[in-house]
Image: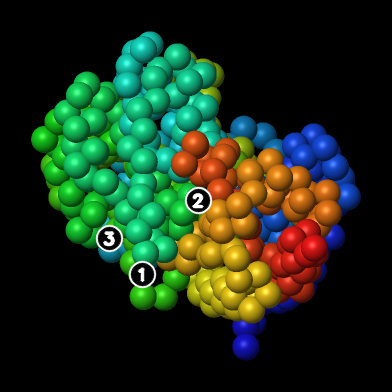
Amino acid sequence: MSHYSFDHVVNRKQTQSVKWDKTDTFFGSSDVLPLWVADMDFLAPPDVLNALQERVNHGVFGYSATSSETSSALTQWLQRKHQWSVNEDSIVYSPGIVFAISMAIQAFTKQGDHILIQSPVYTPFFEMVKLNDRQVVENPLHLKDDRYEIDFTDLEEKLANDIKLMILCSPHNPVGRVWTREELTKIAALCIKYNVLLLSDEIHSDLIYQSHKHIPISSLDDQIAKQTITCVAPSKTFNIPGLQASAIIIPNEQLREAYNKQQQKQGFFTLNTFGIIAIEAAYRKGDAWLNDLLLYLEENVKLVESFIQSKLPDLRVIKPEGTYLMWIDFRNLNMTDEQFNHLLLHKGKVAVEPGTKYGENGSGFVRLNIACPRSTLLEGLERIERALST
Ligand SMILES: Cc1ncc(COP(=O)(O)O)c(C=O)c1O
């Protein structure tokens, strides 16, 4: 029995929620069950809520600064959860990971430079490269026996050919892979061999299912740490992305200074008050809540698997090793992406993310967000069933 009420349904409508209040803008309909944007429909951990409430009660919201309290909360978390020793001096705070990706692109590459990403992958990886007038080079992942794998021959060919930056999604959104030590070691070796700077987006790294283990690529050895920028945040883990607080870990002093300067050039110097409070409370006191959350999410994964197996056997689930996102294969239905998404939206009245948002090789798939009370998830699955009924 969980101490926390993940079954409790919170009404998120009219709370400035992108997921619940903006389906009209993104899907052309406000009458849909939203299982799209990657945030959770759960309350944040009680210790985080209490800390924020205490701060609100104080009532003065002047300029705020992170301190050694903030950084030690993070470094101790990274040590405890991922056995990664990070020096507090290596941390640069950032309002968000997408912002940080754009800052790194601007700080370390030039217009026209080639940046490698592994599709299908989180849409802003493409967008930040293109908006900064750099060029996307894809190392497409391959689906083999219901699991995505890296094509290392293709990766080496591309890294050898003038790639300035590789953006790794670890764990991977949307395909749910938690990269193994062996895979990460190979990626690191190639980045070192071809002198490619690595940005490892580890925003999902605390959301790992049993029998898998997240390894921060920068923790492998000093050599790869020297050319890696790692992005972490309590935002996905504790459902506080609206507080906009992330941390960028850059052990190499020269790179860190260049990165920091890029952020400062945009006029960004410090996090907002609530972000700082939340980082400290979540990383110091969030362990038990996270353990229970993961058990709840794992049951949600099982619900989706059994529902699809028994009621929608033409769909296939790519079982996630981490993240609360499920990647679902509808290619057996012989429908186009437009047909499938139209049915889900207009007949089923359920909003999921079209796979094509994540690159051309996302065609034939959709991404389902399962971080909601089980009753909501079941309602979503029944809507998908209704959409596909004849
Ligand atoms: C891989 C990945 N990176 C970054 C983000 C967003 O990060 P932020 O809100 O800090 O910009 C997401 C959100 O879904 C994500 O999946």
The three-letter amino acid code for the residue at tag 2 is Pro
The residue sitting at the bottom extreme is 1
Circle 3: element type: loop
**Which numbered disc, 1 or 3, marks the residue that appears first in the sequence?**
3
Residue on which disc 1 sits: 212
At 17% across and 28% down in the image, what residue appears? 160
Q: Which residue is mark 2?
A: 174
Above or below: residue 273 compared with residue 347: above
In the orientation shown, which residue stands out farthest toward the top?
A: 111
Amino acid on which disc 3 is placed: Thr
Q: Nearer the viewer, residue 113 or 235?
A: 113
Q: Residue at x 52, y 40 (%)?
A: 358
Mark 3 CB within 8 Å of ligand 1:
no
**Disc 1 crowd, CA 10 A, few/some/many (<14, 14-19, 20+):** few
Which residue shows up at 11% across the image and 35% down it? 193
Which residue was labeled with disc 3?
180
Residue at the image point whose x is 50% and y is 59% from the top: 323
Is residue 358 among the parts visible in the rendering? yes
**In this rendering, which labeled residue sits more in front, label 1 or label 2?**
2
Q: Which of the image's four quarters has the C terminus? A: bottom right
Q: Is residue 121 visible?
A: no
Mark 3, residues whose alpha carbon is within 10 Å: few (<14), some, or many (≥20)?
A: some
Q: Is residue 144 left or right of residue 339?
A: left
Task: Report the coloring of the rendering.
Answer: rainbow
Residue type pointed to by label 1? His
Asked if the residues shown at circle 1 and circle 3 are in contact, with their CB atoms under 8 angstroms apart, the answer is no
Q: If you read the primary sequence from the N terminus, does the residue marked by circle 1 or circle 2 appear first?
A: 2
Dot 2 surroundings within 10 Å: few (below 14), some, or many (20 or more)? many
